[in-house]
Structures are given as structure tokens and as C-alpha cells.
Amino acid sequence: MLRSTGKLASRALKFRTPVIKRSYSQMINQMLQIQQMEICADPPSRGLIIGVYADEEDKNDAGILSQAGWRYNVQKTHGRLLEVLRMSGPMPKRGETRMLFAIEPERVPYYSAVAVVGLGKECLGYNPYEVLDEQKEAIRRSVANACRILAELDTDRIEVENCGHAESAAEGAALGIWVYQELRDPKKRMAVPSIDLYATKDEVCDIEGWRIGLQKAAAQNLTRQLQEMPSNLLTPTAFAQNVVEVLCKSGVNVEVKVEGWAESQSMHAFLAVGKASCEPPIFLELSYYGTCAEERPIVLVGQGVTFDAGGLCLKERDELFHMRGDMTGAAVVVATCRAVAGLRLPVNIRGLIPLCENVVGCNSFRPGDMVKSMNGKTIEVQCTDHEDVLVLADALLYGQNFCPKCIIDIGTCSGYMRQALDEVACGVFTNSEILWQQIKHASMHTGDRVWRFPLWNYYSKAVRAGGRSDVQNYGIGRGGRPCKAAAFLREFVPCGQWMHIVSTCNGVMIINLLFLSLKDATNVMVTEGKEYEYLRRGMAGRPTRTLIEFIAQTICKDTAPKMGK
């Protein structure tokens, strides 16, 4: 009996042994797979950007980490980050990035890559000779460069410390990672990482500044997106549909007015430009009410020529490629309205966008034609390639119906502006010293600079010299094309520096109507992607952030420049 029992037990053991071996082998394989995943996994998808201050002219400068960078260096890497950074060579300069990998002592670091960006000296600030806040611009350039490098490494999430100014850091990050690739194969598109503000528990983070920076950058990216869209897809009708889709979600009212309405308003100058195209002209009216309805609005006028072939005065082949961006002014107005609504600024905005195409057709307007504007002035068309001022003239006249605080028009009226300023600044023409100081002050903060050009009577005489009409769309003389374009537009806004309007709000008072022309944006329409790290090659989306900052500063009386008595 005992024998038989022992035999049964030995048999049972023989049957169990393979099962036990199999289960142990499965467990061991699982453990090895987990270890292999920990050791040989794909690079973790988190990246961190921190700043370092150093004298660019001193190669031996040991560098000083920013506050957030110093906390990370001490608490997470136990001083190893700064040690490795100093061993890797001279400190990075403004706009440069030093990449450090697996700097944390953990086996699987939380941040796979840490980008240390150069911020220059700690004492950087406003430079009156450059008319620029160099500290904010250094933050934008450096953070954008680091984000682009991390994006190329397929980083899914990037955390950015404020580097001393959260708004500028957010602008640089959001502008730097943006790329137009809607029409590409989804499999071949570049990976766009998410960005967030890096902060620790014992640190007070400027989340509001970060949010404002993201709003401004998103507005400029919207401008770039509209600029980059090919003209066969972004016709005047398609542009209007895009605007309705984008702005109605943001609380901005959009009215789409058709060709018949423009004829009833006697906008013959505007209609003359678009009559050769199969696409009908459209006039958009945008309304945003951030304060009481009685408050006078700021009127924004954007040139909306969705493609400019030059008409019968056809452009050169090389010029035609970028003429899909001739609606830059319209795109800037749309993006600005969305940003103002997103920031909930207490201001009323009225945006006016005349949309059309200037192409060759059997019904093209011709050199020597005479057209009448809304105010009855006769305009002689000397060149069909200078249609921009014709499009803006009627819109400026229509804008005076709203009793505005000021009128701002944005257009691309002359390629000669690039010869004067290259892509470093927009040209500004204004009859108001107050508006000039405000727009200059705004551009100083955004890094998207502006420069004032003369609006002298000399140029007004040049566009009035024709004996057959009141004004000419080109004028006499060989040069000064941007100045003559501004002088032409001045004929369709209040004469002189001020226009007196009687208002019955709280009694009888005199209202000053100011006029600011953000012209010309032609030279900043396209960028080569070399001057600014936060702008890739292509359409630049400028001067959107400067215009948003300008509107914000007109509200904040403490930051607006004050004029002496």
C-alpha cells in the first residue's frame, strides 16, 4: 500500500514539474521584459527648458541659472546639471540652446532632455537705441529655438520655465513650434508637442502672464495660417466662411455683406478692383463689445486682396508666388479681434475687411479709368497694380460712420518698404503724435518693431497733381511710393491732424478723431526664418501681437505714454 502511494506521489510530481517550470519561465520572461522596457525603452517624451544668465563677451563666465533652473539643479539633479553645463563649454548666448540628456540621477529620469537656453546678462532691459526690450526678446528667441530642437526629437510635452517673464516665454514657445502642414500627408507631418509652464510647489508662477502670451501667439499663428493658405482655397467667399467659423465661437459678431450692398454704399473704388474675377467681392464687418455700447469703438481696417496678380499691369513671375499673402491686413484684423475677445479686454472693436481678387479678366479695370469713392472724390487709376489703396479708401470712409476713437488700417501697399527697413520693422504713417507714441511703446514690448515715416504735404500734392481727377492712385514723381500711398489714404480720412465731432454724451464736447496707418506690412509679410528663431521660413503673421498690445495699452492709462502740455 505504501509502495503504491509512493508511486502515485512520484507520478503526480512528474506531471506538476512541467507546469511549475512553465509558470516560472513566464514570470521570468515578464520580469525581463519589464527590465528591458525600463532600460531600452523609447526616449521619454518630456522635455524641460530652463534659462542661464551669462556675459556673452566673456567666455570664462561661469553662468548663473534662473531661479526655477537653480531649484531644479539642486532638488532634482543635486548640482549635477550646472556641473555638466560648465564642463560642456562656454555658456550659451542669446538665442542659443545647450541640450543635456538624462541629467537626473534616477534610472528613468522624469525629463529625458533638459534644454538650457542663453538669456544674456541679467541687467538686460529696454535699449533706447534699438527701441526694444532686449530681455523679453532674448527670452522669445531662446525659448523658441529650444522648443524647435525638442520638437525635432519627437518630444510629446515641453515644460518651459518663465525665464523672468512668463508672457514672452509663452510667445516664444507657441510661435516656435507652429508649422503650416494642413495640406500634407498626416503620416509625414512634423510632430507638434504640447507646451506648459514649469513651476514647483514653493514657487509663485505667473499663470496669467503665460495665458496672455499664449493668446497673443495663437493670434499671430492664426494670421500665419490664413496667409499660408493657397489662394485657390482661400477665395473671398472661403475667407468669409473661415472668419465666421473662427470668430463666432469667440463672441465676435460677423456680418457678411455682398456685392449688392457695396453698390448701395457707392463703394465704386473697391468694386472696380474685384470686377475682373469670377469670385464676387465681399465686405466683412466684425463687431466686439467689451464695454458699454455707448463707448466709441476702435475701428480696424484690413486690406483683403486674397490674390494680387496686378491686373492688366501684371506682376513679375517671382512676385506672384507670395501674392496669396496680400490679405495680410485682413488676417491681422481677424486674429486681433479673436485675441481681444479671448483676453476680454474692456474695449469696443469694429473690424472692416473688404475682400476681393485683383486678377486679369475681360472685365478688368484699366490704366486711365476714373472711379468714384464713397465721398464723391474722383480717382484716376494710373496703375492697376496699385489697387490696395483703392480697396482701403472706401473702407476708411465707411469706418467714420461709427464715430470711432481712432482708425487703424493695415495693408501691404508697397514692396519698396522692404528696401528701407528689410524685415525688421513695419512702417507707420500717422497724423497723431499720441498714437505714434502708443504704437511705438507697444512694439517695444512685443519685439515686433515699428518705425514712423513722414506724412508731409509734399506727398499729398504728388497724388493730387493730376488735372483730370481729384486724386491719383500712384501720383507723380519717381520715388516715395509708400509715402504717396499713405498720402492717398489721408484724402479719405479727416483732413489735418484732428477732426472735430460733436457728441451729446454728458453734455456737448469735442471729440478728436485720430488716424493711424500701419503701413506698410509688405516687408514683414514674409520671413526667411533666419532673423527670428520664433518664426519659421514663410509667412510671418506680423504685426498682430503689436496691434493687440497697442489696444491693451490704450485701455491701461498707466502704461500709455503721456504727452506734455
Image (cartoon, rainbow, N blue to C red):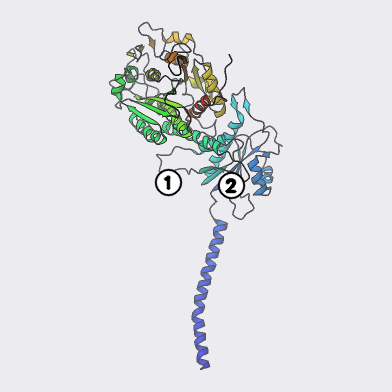
Q: Is tag 2's residue or tag 1's residue first in the polypeptide sequence?
A: 2
In the image, 375 versus 133, the foreground residue is: 375
Q: Which residue: 45% across, 14% down?
A: 508
Work out which residue is located at the far front of the displayed protein and give it: 507
Q: Position of residue 275 (x, y in %)?
A: 30, 22
Q: Which residue: 49% across, 17% down?
A: 429
Q: Position of residue 67 (x, y in %)?
A: 65, 40
In the rendered image, which quarter is residue 563 located in? Answer: top right
Work out which residue is located at the far bottom of the displayed protein and give it: 1
In the image, 177 versus 220, the foreground residue is: 220
Q: Which residue: 46% across, 34% down?
A: 342
Residue 434 to residue 27: above or below: above
Q: Position of residue 291 (x, y in %)?
A: 45, 28
Is residue 459 at least partly visible in the picture?
yes
SS for callout 2: strand
SS for callout 1: helix
In the rendered image, which quarter is residue 185 located in? Answer: top left
In the image, which disc is placed on residue 187? Answer: 1
In the image, which disc is placed on residue 461? Answer: none
- Amino acid marked by disc 2: Ala
Q: Which residue: 30% across, 24% down?
A: 259
In the image, which disc is placed on residue 113? Answer: 2
